[in-house]
Amino acid sequence: MAFLVLSNGTVFEGTSIGAQLDSVGELVFNTGVVGYLEMITDPAYAGQILVQTFPLCGNYGVIESDFEGECALAGFVARSVCETPSNFRSQYDLTRYFREHGIPAIVGIDTRELTRILREEGSMNAMICDSIPESLDGIRAYCVKQRVASVSAKESVVYPAEGEEKYRVTLVDYGTKKSLIRTLCALGCTVKVVPYNTTAEEILSDKPSGVVLSGGPGNPEDNPECAAELAKIIGELPVFAVGLGHQLAALALGGRVERLPLGHRGGNHPVREIGGSRTYITSQNHGYAVDAESLSHVGIERYTNANDGTCEGMEYPAKKCFTLQFTPDTLGGAHSTSFLYDRFIEMLEQ
């Protein structure tokens, strides 16, 4: 027996299938039907307890080559986890994964009711535990802070281009997904991944063709030193940013960010091209959004979320900088936004 205790006092009873330890985190939900491996290994979930809204996960087991990074979750919640996965690529089951990686996980939860609570009251903190605490103070006081350092690369690593090297790109790792690196390499880029706190002087002295800013966890305003270094880079080299990198670029150029009530987490978020006729279905994972109006002096909003109108993409023509709130899909899914990588390649060529 295990419990999921919400900061508003609501308690759900379930069964523990993960590490036997108490854990507090920010409770968020993802609406994806598939892709649970990519979810639980996305570094942008650092410090959060992830709720899978689809009632079943684990049915195709654990496939390590599909991992996006190291699991940084504070916990995992599901209605049901398959104990006998069936897939020719499966290596072992999800229960073993959680236990070996020290991740508390609880199943048997009414995730539909749980999601309704979150949709009505907004993201909140919660605890996975084996006994209900007498006080909720510790749960309520929790905050996802300074998580970038915990998920960023500890030292520089170079990934060679597939085939002939066309460009040398520096990727600043705020919690990058491996698929971003693979895509850049497939486009002919040799990618040098550097830690989040690498200085602008170090990056510029290496003379790369361009710079990529990765996604990552938490509040972008917790990383003022990163924004300060980016302010020295943007305008000097072509810059392409996604996720947290998109938000940090906005801060570096004098913009503002705002916290979203629920955030955008799932594989079905509609993004409209401003001034165009296309709407793209995107995969997203973030709790903050850029205030496009605060950047009107230097940038142009290119994409907006069709559900809530929040900013999904900015272009800074005079700065040779293009940023997106989502990561364009090219591998293992829809390819409708892969052309956005081509825009970065065009910037490098110019």
Image (cartoon, rainbow, N blue to C red):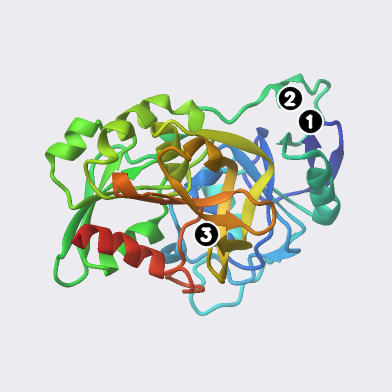
Of residues 240 and 43, the one nearer the viewer is: 240
In the rendered image, is residue 46 in sight?
no
Q: Is residue 187 above or below residue 300?
A: below
Question: Mark 3 or mark 2, which is nearer the start of the sequence?
Answer: 3
Secondary structure of the residue carrying tag 3 is helix
Number of labels in the image equals: 3
Tag 2: amino acid: Arg
Residue 107 lies, in percent from the top left, at 75, 53
Residue 9 drawn above or below residue 81: above
The residue indicated by pointer 2 is 140
The residue drawn where x is 78% and y is 44% is: 118
Q: Position of residue 202 (x, y in %)?
A: 18, 34
Instruction: Classify mark 2: residues with Cα within 10 Å, few (<14), some (14-19) or many (20+).
Output: some
Q: Earlier in the sequence, mark 1 or mark 3?
A: 1
Type of amino acid under label 3? Glu
Local crowd size for mark 3, using a 10 Å CA cut-off: few (<14), some (14–19), many (≥20): some
Instruction: For the C terminus, give its image quadrant.
Output: bottom left
Q: Which residue is mark 1?
A: 7
Q: CA distance from mark 1 to mark 3?
A: 27 Å
Residues under numbered marks 2 and 3 in contact, where contact means CB atoms less than 8 Å apart: no
What residue is shown with label 3? 38
Per the model, the C-alpha gap separating discs 2 and 3 is 28 Å
Give x and y (percent) for residue 159: 23, 57
* Residue 139 numbered tag: none
